[in-house]
Image (cartoon, rainbow, N blue to C red):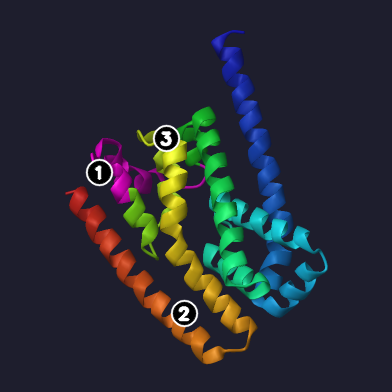
Amino acid sequence: MSKITENKKNILIFLTMVIAMALICLILYKPFSNYLNDPAILKEKLAKFGNWGKLMLIFAMTIQVIFVFLPGEIIEVAAGFCYGTIPGLIICLTGSIIGSIFIYWFIEKFGLNFVKKFFDLKKFHEVAFLKKEKNLELIIFIIFFIPGTPKDLLTYIAPFTRIKLKTFLLLTTFARIPSVITSTIGGNALSNQNYRFTILVFVITGLISLIGLICYNFYIKKKNL
């Protein structure tokens, strides 16, 4: 097979997958957005599916990591609301792992052509310095550990650095726990109608996220001077 023919085949596969995933997003977006606006209805609907309901939330989290068509925090709160703090945490982390694996595979196959579909390359180039960072693993862990940082962007640039998929999954899975569990704790408290505690959790998480985002932007600007 010639290189031109192989490239055409890869482009065709890429376009087919993007269209298929886009259709899935369009089909799921409306019902999911409606249900997520009313977690009680979502909990009732998912309960009818048994364990399949958990798989549906894992799938939603996977799609969110890849396509960012839903805010991850909403899915995390919904997981905590429907299934409790720890099961919700496991659901969200599982979806994040699967989504990250897909991103690594897509980028290995299609490179920047895939990234351009979801991000402005200007933002991508802002974190390009990570390719040469000696403390790459530590930086990635800290960024994923702090709520409010753009984890989706980092997931897309990681395959272009020296970090291997297994290392990336290990670091980010553990680093995500504090951020995700605060959402599932809040969702679980909301499910139990513990509204004061729910508000407290979300306010504290929001403040930490704001501080984390400010620190991240300061770090990025410093690195790009």
Which image quarter is the N terminus in? top right
Residue 16 visible here: yes
Residue at 52 percent across and 67 percent down: it is 73
Residue matched to label 2: 202
- Is residue 118 on the magenta stretch? yes
Task: Say what secondary structure mark 2 lies in.
Answer: helix
Q: Are marks 2 and 3 in contact (CB under 8 Å)?
A: no
| Numbered circle sitting on residue 164 | 3
Magenta-highlighted residues: 117-139
Q: Nearer the viewer, mark 2 or mark 3?
A: 3
- Give the crowd class for mark 2: few <14, some 14-19, many >=20 residues within 10 Å: some
Of the residues under marks 3 and 1, which one precedes in the sequence? 1
Quick check: is 105 in the magenta stretch? no
Q: Of the residues under marks 1 and 2, which one precedes in the sequence?
A: 1
Distance from disc 2 to disc 3, alpha carbons, whole Å, reads 34 Å
Is 195 situated left or right of 119 in this image? right
Q: In the image shown, does 94 or 151 lie closer to the viewer?
A: 94
Q: Residue at x 59, y 16 (%)?
A: 6
Of residues 168 and 218, the one nearer the viewer is 168
* Marks 1 and 2, how far apart at CA: 32 Å
